[in-house]
Amino acid sequence: MTILDRLDGGASRDGDDLIAGSRIEDARIHNRRLVFETIFQRGPISRVEISGIVGLKPQTISSITRELLEQELIVEAGRSSGLRGQPQIYLEANAEAGWSIGVHLDQNHCSILAFDLRRRERGRLSLRLDTKSPAAAVRALSTAILGLLEENGQPVDKVWGIGLVLPTFGSDVYDFDFSIQHWDAWRDASFAEELQQLTGMPVLVENDATAAAIGERIHRPDAGEATFVYYYVGHGSGAGVIIDGYPFKGVGGNAGEIGLLPVPGIPANPVWSNGTADSREQAPSPLSLEGLAAACGVEEASLSDQLVDHMLTIRDHRLMNWLAHAANVLRDVTAIIEVMYDPGFIAVGGPLPRAIVERLVDRAYPLRPTPAARHDRSLPRLLPAKLIEDAAVTGAAMLPIFVNISHNFRHLYFRQLLSDEGSDDAQ
């Protein structure tokens, strides 16, 4: 029985069920996932609290939680004391029920993070690898992931899946070549399928901005923070859009590709200058890792937190000029995002040093007048993300869990899931 079968109470499923919206018509399965998702996100939590959040009757909550306890997907986490009436039993996800692996693949570098079902970090790796060759990179990834599991005594069949995040368009369906420099070979490579075959685990692919937004959402569980945009600044830039707590991906999965807009200062669209790809050879855009490194007069690999802190301390004129220029760009991008999506707030993050992100946000104020400028706001319009450097890999690690426990996540990735399950059936 698979992990998803356990969550569905042993019910069978097929591709038609997924396309129909993950069997939303089956109220029992929907309720089981809803209850488990609530416990996963908010535990330790009592049955009374669960009932108040999801709106199900206490008898239904008791029945579902009893089944989840029997299947060891959740555990009791203590009792209330000193209160009038019968003590409340608190429930939380069972940390030993499984792991999830997140992989953030960037230019010649990879971060791997393993979480258990209580969202505790169980393993971490950082390695250099040749990302110009998809085949070599995937082999190195599979070796590293399997080694991490073996080192921690975690069997493959106890892993819910691998979330793989990388900054590239992976299809030849587009009329124009939007490939990012250095990632051309990945355009039509079957890297997810190969990684799944090598590791024996399902693989879900996402872009870095959306993954970072998912990671940020994990650290902002309140309903008032459920609609926002994560503006990701790395080698390129993009926006991860979260609406009502779930990622908005668009028809082709490309919502939020802010970096392709013809806005001066953000990474250049490779095809809009004159219909060719020669704009890739232009100087790096200010609002990027390359732009920051170039402004500081160092190689990107030398752009350490220590160097940045020193340059900030002495107010190095090169860094101050970059901050001024990049903040102007961020101000324009903020206005575009606000009028397009009307988010509750915009969080800025990515592999930039946190000190840089904080100063960049400060210098972007005052922001341009948009309808987002309201007197009743509870959060600033633009702010540093809670998760900055680890946002993408954290979101990657959460992706397999949320896809398994939530209808709202699962239907967003049903094309990948159908492919995965078809591979399983063939074995």
Image: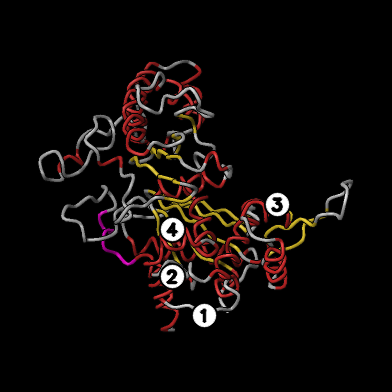
Taking 136 as reference, is 84 above or below it?
above
Q: Amino acid at mark 1?
A: Ser
Q: Under tag 4, what secondary structure? A: strand
Sequence-wise first label, 1 or 2: 1
Q: Does the residue at mark 2 contact the one at mark 4 (Cβ under 8 Å)? A: no
Taking 379 as reference, is 32 above or below it?
below
In terms of image quadrants, where is residue 317?
top left
Q: Which mark, residue 164? A: 4
Residue 278: x %, y % from top left: 14, 42
Residue located beneath label 2 in the image: 196
Residue 124: x %, y % from top left: 57, 53
- The residues bearing labels 4 and 1 have C-alpha atoms spaced at a distance of 27 Å
Residue located beneath label 3 in the image: 49
Q: Which mark, residue 103? A: none
Residue 289: x %, y % from top left: 37, 36
Q: Amino acid at mark 4?
A: Leu
